[in-house]
Amino acid sequence: MPVKREDDIAGDLAVATVVDRVTTENGELVLRRRGPHFEIISNGTFLMDTRDGTSERLLVNAALDAALDAVARLGDTPRTDLRVLIGGLGVGFSLGAAVARPEVGRIVVVEREEPVITWQHGPLAPFSGHALHDPRVEVRRADLVAWVLSAGEVPGASDEFDALCLDIDNGPDWTVTASNDSLYGDAGLRALRRRLRPGGVLAVWSAAASPAFEERLATVFGDVRVEEVPVRVPRGVPDVVYLAR
Ligand SMILES: C[S@@+](CC[C@H](N)C(=O)[O-])C[C@H]1O[C@@H](n2cnc3c(N)ncnc32)[C@H](O)[C@@H]1O
């Protein structure tokens, strides 16, 4: 049974206050504060909070470990130049994990919502360890799905990466906008595979297991591993990280 920390309990009991409320072309985004915690709400649906970033960090660390493992098997020298894509900035836990890795030489963050980037320069900065100050980090305000599917047409969209770390939805079966659905279909997965360097790894975060998605991944990539992370909510299903190459 997941155990609640003291600041979780304090946060749960606290009244939520709205820090910022913005309407973008994709609807309404709200940043709320509840005690020591922040919450991002998209069109009335909970998107992310700062309570526990375990699975969001695992998304990056497991992908990088798997990519490094492949490099080691190729007999390469130790690396400091890995290229990582973070799809979806959120509160910055995944980005924080990427900047903490000395093997990483470049991190591209693709985030669709300007307010999320603005909040990362403000109250959410501590949750990435102030990663936007790291010279290896480049933030592109863009739609990840369009960016992935339109190589060659959008500047930088044909870049290749050692780790593609995607967390833009609550999962392949629970997307925040319908336009995100195509990322998880066959064409989206094939486009993602083309963005990987040799030995590179695709990592996809999901709030619940998706057997159909796992099957599609296996068809397109061949090698799929699934990591489950228990959540600190009574009777909550584990978060899932899919790793494919
Ligand atoms: C669940 S949060 C990401 C959480 C993040 N892993 C973290 O550690 O905080 C999802 C993020 O993806 C962004 N997003 C959603 N759809 C997107 C898209 N099509 N392209 C780029 N970003 C998108 C949202 O605005 C939000 O910032």
Image: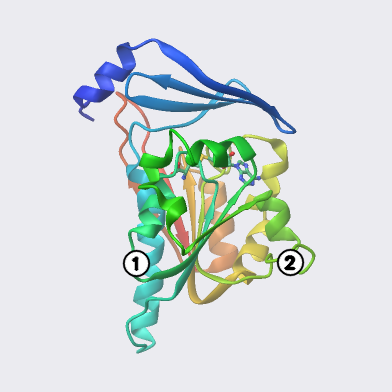
Q: Residue 118: which quarter of the image?
A: top right
How is colour applied across the structure in the image? Answer: rainbow
Identify the residue at image location x=70%, y=57%: 147
**2 or 1: tag closer to the N-terminus:** 1
**Marks 2 & 1, CB-CB < 8 Å contact:** no
Identify the residue at image location x=43%, y=76%: 81
> Dot 2: what SS?
loop
Identify the residue at image location x=45%, y=59%: 243
User: Along the line of sight, which residue is nearer the eye, 68 or 130?
Assistant: 130
Q: Quadrant of the N terminus?
A: top left
Let me know if residue 121 appears in the view: yes
Question: Residue flagged by tag 1: what amino acid is it?
Answer: Asp
Report x, y in % for residue 223: 47, 68
Label tally:
2
Q: Is residue 245 above or below residue 142?
A: below
Query: On the image, numbered disc 2 is attached to which residue?
Result: 151
